[in-house]
Image (spheres, grey):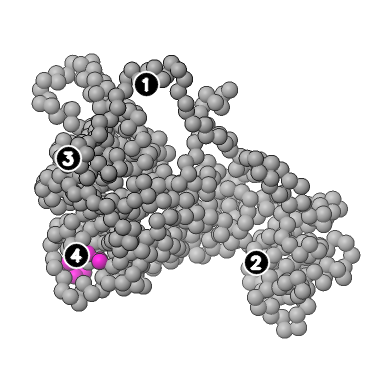
Amino acid sequence: MSSKRNGQMTQIPQPCPHLAGFRSRHGLRFFRAIQKCLRVKPLGRASIRRDSGEFPRCGTCATGECTGTHLYACVACASVFCHLSSESSHAAAHAESMPPGHEIAVDVDRAELFCCACRDQVYDRDFDASVVLAQTAASTLGGSKIREAPPENLRKRRRVDYRPWTPDPRELVLIRRGSSSLQRGNGDSSDCLPWGLRGLNNLGNTCFLNSILQALLHTPPLRNYFLSDRHNRYECQQKKNFSNASKKISTSNDNGKNSRLCLACDMDAMFSAAFSGDRSPYSPARFLYSWWQHAANLASYEQQDAHEFFISMLDGIHEKVEKDQGKPQSQGNGDCCIAHRVFSGILRSDVTCTACGFTSTTYDPCVDISLDLEPNQGGSKMASTKSHYSCNVELDSTISSQSFGISTLVGCLDRFTRPEKLGSDQKFFCQQCQMRQESLKQMSIRKLPLVSCFHIKRFEHSSIRNMSRKVDRYLQFPFSLNMAPYLSSSILRSRFGNRMFTFDGDEQYASNELSSEFELFAVITHTGKLDAGHYVTYLRLSNQWYKCDDAWITQVSEDLVRAAQGYMMFYVQKMLYYKASEKLAAS
């Protein structure tokens, strides 16, 4: 049996005839008996036990030990037998020696159906539904919110084929009338650089600002947004003046301040300057002043942290949208502003009680992921970066020597999503046990952003020693990154087994698995000490790497980028998936 999907033939496995025959003879009577034996362990793994202390063993093996094998309980007679391979299967031998009806068994450790005649796993929707409901009941207080039956086609979603836009004759006339060609440079050596690559002058310890701006100027979704005139600074200023006039507020008393409070307008000016064709270094003084208006506590010529500036700038654009629309905008859905439309994702945190298995789940929006360097390669666990600005301490050679070693970005992500046992001083209140219990915490990514920003915690502060230091450990980062193992759907699948259901409304984010491949396009590095360092950005444009060191732009090799001390890495999705519009859905 086959079907045609997207022009390709896809083989669909035939249903098991033994399972169909078993259901036609017995219906759901035996499955209901198995449901009473379902036991859910901490982290949600389902198993089959008549009581929690039961230790199942193979009824054929003389020793009673079946190391390395799967144990299966016959659905018809509840006898337990092992299955190691096609040649060594006591479960298959039991099915052959018994009359018809004993072919279907259930894995006692994973609660998955198995056909002893076909010697393969089989799928039954009603049985899997009961397992999923039992797992959900174990993590839901009271179980009153459990659905009676799973809805049909939980993963059903509409796909829209991408069609490139081609202008018609009327649109061609409008394009020629309303646009002008970009002017090339003066024929010097800088003309060989990619379009839009322009140096930024250092205005006094502003390398942190220049490094972030260079990464944002060449972030593909952000660049496409501003270069397509989606935010026009002149129209934005006109709307602001009209709003002030309607409120009878005189703009003459503002001394020009209101015109510089919109960071999105200043980003639009930055894109216009970068892609104007002028190769001379540009001074982002207007943007710096506008940022100072937003972050008054950081308004100085002292060295600042590039990561803190990145977060502060995105918050400034978001707050501008809230102020214009007059109501709070949620960052989680990523539709509030262009900043969160590009960088916003959702993190999922599961805290599971080790005593009863109750799971408390929370979701938090994020615009980046801060990662600790792997501690087993030297050094200790990092603390937050926000505490190192007021400290100016030089460490001796014995302490700084702990910084040497090698970590990997993949290893940092594995550590970030690994289950972690919370200490005795971090016991959480279990709503089911009604007392504080020890627990396991696991992080995962519920929704991937268009652009993933990873921040490496290279600055740590010790409250015991009252000192701060920088960790100079080398970090290996891939140029292509698969984020599928860190998604909530992947982690839940490994936790609950190979169930064909989504959990907690995650079906709307099912396309994450289709767009989980990312590609590196920008790396921000920090060299030097904690209080006297320098930021540099490496950009990948047209399959070539360029070093942006304030006003100086140079072409570099790929090996030099790999050897750089990464502080922030920017990855963009290789494949973008478009949502169907409301007009298309209505038609």
What separation in Å lies between label 1 and label 2 (alpha carbons)? 65 Å
Give the answer, above or below, for where 504 lies relative to 424: above
Identify the mark at residue 109; answer none if there is no mark: 2
Q: Residue furthest right?
A: 99
* Mark closest to the chain's N terminus, 4 or 1: 1
Q: Which residue is mark 1?
A: 175
How far apart marks 3 and 4 lie (CA) works out to 39 Å
Q: Position of residue 327 (x, y in %)?
A: 33, 30
Amino acid, disc 3: Ser
User: Which secondary structure lies at badge 1?
Assistant: helix
Which residue corresponds to mark 3? 280
Instruction: Report the span colored magenta.
Output: 464-472
- Say which element carries label 3: loop
- Mark 2 element type: loop
10 Å crowding of disc 3: few (<14), some (14-19), many (20+): some
> In the image, which is nearer the foreground, mark 3 or mark 4?
3
Residue 444 place in picture, x, y as percent = 45, 54
Q: Is residue 247 visible?
A: no
Rendered image quadrant of residue 3: top right
Badge 4: residue crowd in 10 Å (few <14, some 14–19, many ≥20): many
Label drawn at residue 506: none
Give 340 or 268, whichever is nearer the viewer.
268
Which residue is depicted at the point 24% across and 23% down?
234
Above or below, 379 relative to 579: below
